[in-house]
């Protein structure tokens, strides 16, 4: 972007101003609006379509449009990537983010997007796999380990649970054994792997490319 040729701001909070000021004109009586935000302005990290809406109204609206995609991240050693995974899952209207292992996780990277995202904890990978079986979700482990197939050559299932491993150990043997398949993201450089949250973003977007209706995206 240059001064002479400014790119118009996209339909998100990343415009030229940090949010919007107080409502201009007579106050609307739509119950989705929050009286305090109408009065004070809205600088939350929400798309413009949700400006001044109550949190409950935003969640209810996303709940109508959630995708048939679940993601899980293993958290046996406190993985700092979970916040970023939650934020990306929110952006793609993922059904639920499942956290396996330790209940506590670092919310910083989520940038408060976790308030609008369904989250579910499972003590063990076995518990997560039972959940997937009960709900008819096809489990896909994501890691570049022996036995994996290329994500680039794979159509992810519609009713899908993607499981990601953690920095260091990677995907657990339990997750890999319980999955219908393991997919790897093609790499070409020297590093053994990409960051787990980056891998999660790539894999979630592969599902979006295969199954989402982009005409309904912001
Ligand atoms: C940093 S990796 C660690 C394990 C990795 N297998 C290794 O040998 O270093 C952490 C997680 O990120 C995801 N990941 C990283 N790079 C990936 C790739 N190229 N393909 C698929 N998943 C990847 C996987 O879910 C993995 O469990």
Image (cartoon, grey):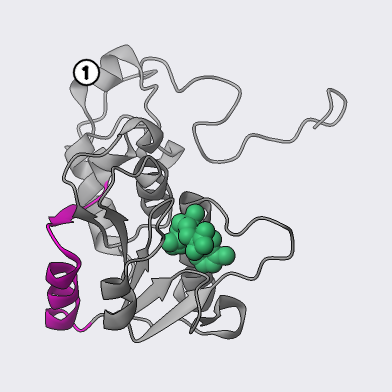
Q: Position of residue 6 (x, y in %)?
A: 78, 30
Q: Position of residue 135 (x, y in %)?
A: 16, 79
Residue 86 position (above or below residue 25): below
Number of marks = 1
Residue displayed at 44% across by 21% down: 20
Residue displayed at 12% across by 57% down: 123
- Please indicate whether residue 55 sits to the left or right of residue 158 in the image: left
Q: Position of residue 156 (x, y in %)?
A: 45, 81
Q: Which quarter of the picture shows residue 82? A: top left
Q: Which residues are magenta?
A: 117-136
Q: Position of residue 50 (x, y in %)?
A: 35, 39
- Please indicate whether residue 193 sits to the left or right of residue 118 in the image: right
Closer to the camera, 75 or 114?
Answer: 75
Q: Which quarter of the picture shows residue 11? A: top right
Closer to the camera, 153 or 64?
Answer: 153
Extreme residue in the right direction? 4
- Counting other residues with Cα less than 10 Å from the Cα at mark 1, is it few (<14), some (14-19), or many (20 or more)? few
**Any part of residue 30 in sight:** no
Closer to the camera, 65 or 70?
Answer: 70
Which residue was labeled with disc 1? 36
Classify mark 1: helix, strand or loop.
helix
Residue 18 position (above or below residue 178): above
Residue displayed at 35% across by 47% down: 86
Q: Is residue 182 magenta?
A: no
Would you say the beta carbon of the disc 1 residue lies within 8 angstroms of ligand 1? Answer: no
Closer to the camera, 206 or 60?
Answer: 206
Residue displayed at 20% across by 67% down: 125
Q: Is residue 119 magenta?
A: yes
- Please indicate whether residue 59 sits to the left or right of residue 159 in the image: left
On-image quarter of the N terminus: top right
Residue 77 position (above or below residue 159): above
**Any part of residue 183 in sight:** yes
């Amino acid at each position: 972007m240059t001064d002479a040729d400014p790119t118009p701001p996209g339909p998100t909070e990343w415009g030229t101003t940090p949010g919007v000021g107080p409502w201009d004109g007579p106050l609307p009586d739509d119950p989705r609006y929050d009286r305090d935000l109408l009065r004070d302005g809205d600088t939350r990290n929400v798309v413009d379509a949700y400006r001044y809406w109550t949190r409950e109204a935003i969640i209810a609206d996303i709940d109508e449009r959630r995708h048939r995609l679940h993601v899980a991240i293993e958290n046996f050693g406190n993985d700092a990537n979970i916040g970023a995974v939650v934020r990306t899952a929110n952006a793609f209207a993922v059904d639920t983010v499942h956290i396996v292992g330790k209940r506590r996780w670092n919310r910083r990277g989520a940038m408060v997007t976790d308030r609008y995202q369904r989250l579910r904890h499972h003590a063990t990978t076995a518990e997560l796999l039972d959940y997937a079986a009960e709900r008819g979700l096809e489990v896909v482990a994501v890691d570049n380990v022996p036995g994996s197939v290329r994500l680039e050559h794979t159509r992810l299932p519609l009713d899908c649970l993607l499981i990601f491993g953690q920095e260091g150990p990677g995907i657990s043997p339990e997750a890999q054994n319980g999955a219908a398949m393991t997919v790897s993201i093609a790499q070409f450089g020297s590093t053994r792997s990409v960051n787990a949250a980056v891998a999660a973003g790539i894999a979630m977007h592969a599902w979006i490319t295969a199954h989402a209706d982009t005409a309904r995206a912001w």
